[in-house]
Amino acid sequence: MPSQQTDPKSLDENTGSLTDRAYRELEERVVTLQLQPGAVLSETALSTQLGIGRTPIREALQRLARESLIVILPRKGILVSEINPGKQLLVLEVRRELERLMARAGAVRRSDEERDAFLEIANGMEKASRDNDDIAFMRHDIAFNDLFAKAAHNEYAVRAIGLMNGLSRRFWYVHNKEAADMPLCARLHAAVARAIAAGDADGAADASDRLVDFVETFTRTTVGVAPAR
């Protein structure tokens, strides 16, 4: 019988989907401290644990390294990055401007399908708020960030904000029990989502600023820095 050839395109798409799955699972483990700062990672061990080949695992790790959640040391190993509280305020300086721009753009450019997805996320965020469920909130936050970036239809803003989301989620997860009000944070996210869904650019920008104000206050409290004047 003649050998059956595999379509290279289908291989690429399959590898891509596996890379995305590996990234999502590893990012959640790092952000929720299942993989602790300073932990040494092994491609082989992660491949076995997740049931995913080493190539998608390697690509997912490279993405996490670009987002500063892990550190790849050539010929030495792969480490989960340490948490640097002071740098969170620098991250927030950039997030404020980018997220305001993206909130406005999303309200103007979002599709009807994206509108419906924002409303679904807002409902999920509000339920997480009522249940005080931080893991559900984290998962809705990931969905919110992905949709927030997609709806803005600005690839350059998406690349920039993507480098900060994981760091911000991990910082929140580490410190939220001591200083954050998760239900309020969830409601503030829901307000951004609802304003974008409504096509209200000014309202979305204002809601984004209120969310970042909350996150900045939380961060300053955590790192012991006085509020900005």
Image (tube, rainbow, N blue to C red):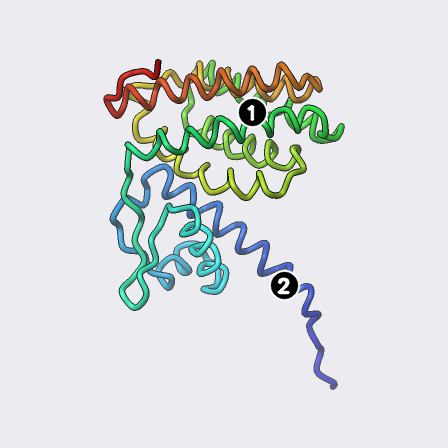
Residue 153 is situated, as x and y percent measured from the top left of the image, at 67, 37
Q: Position of residue 165 (x, y in %)?
A: 46, 36
Taking the view exactly as shown, the residue that stands out farthest to the front is 229
The mark found on residue 100 in the picture is: 1
State the residue lying farthest toward the bottom.
1
Q: Is residue 41 above or below residue 6?
A: above
| Quarter of the image that includes the C terminus | top left
Of 175 and 226, nearer the camera is 226
Gap between marks 2 and 1, in whole Å?
35 Å
| Residue 135 in which image quadrant | top left
The numbered mark at residue 12 is 2
First in sequence, mark 2 or 1: give its number.
2
Q: Is residue 71 left or right of residue 122?
A: left
Screen quadrant of the N terminus: bottom right
Disc 2 marks a residue whose amino acid type is Asp
Query: Which is nearer the eye, 50 or 181?
Result: 181
- Residue, x 47% and y 30% (percent of image)? 95
| Rendered view: 44 above or below 26 | below
- Where residue 66 appears, x then y in whole percent? 43, 50
Residue for point 32% across, 65% down:
74
Q: Quadrant of residue 121?
A: top right
Tell how many labels: 2
At x 66%, y 28%, the residue is 106
Give how far across and how far down residue 228 sits, in percent: 34, 17
Question: Is residue 184 toward the left or the right of residue 177 in the image?
Answer: right
Q: Residues within 10 Å of mark 1 (few under 14, many from 20)?
A: many
Compared to residue 3, the image places residue 32 above or below, namely above
Residue density around tag 2, few if under 14, some if 14–19, many if 20 or more, within 10 Å: few
Position of residue 15 relative to residue 100, above or below, is below
Label 2 residue SS:
helix
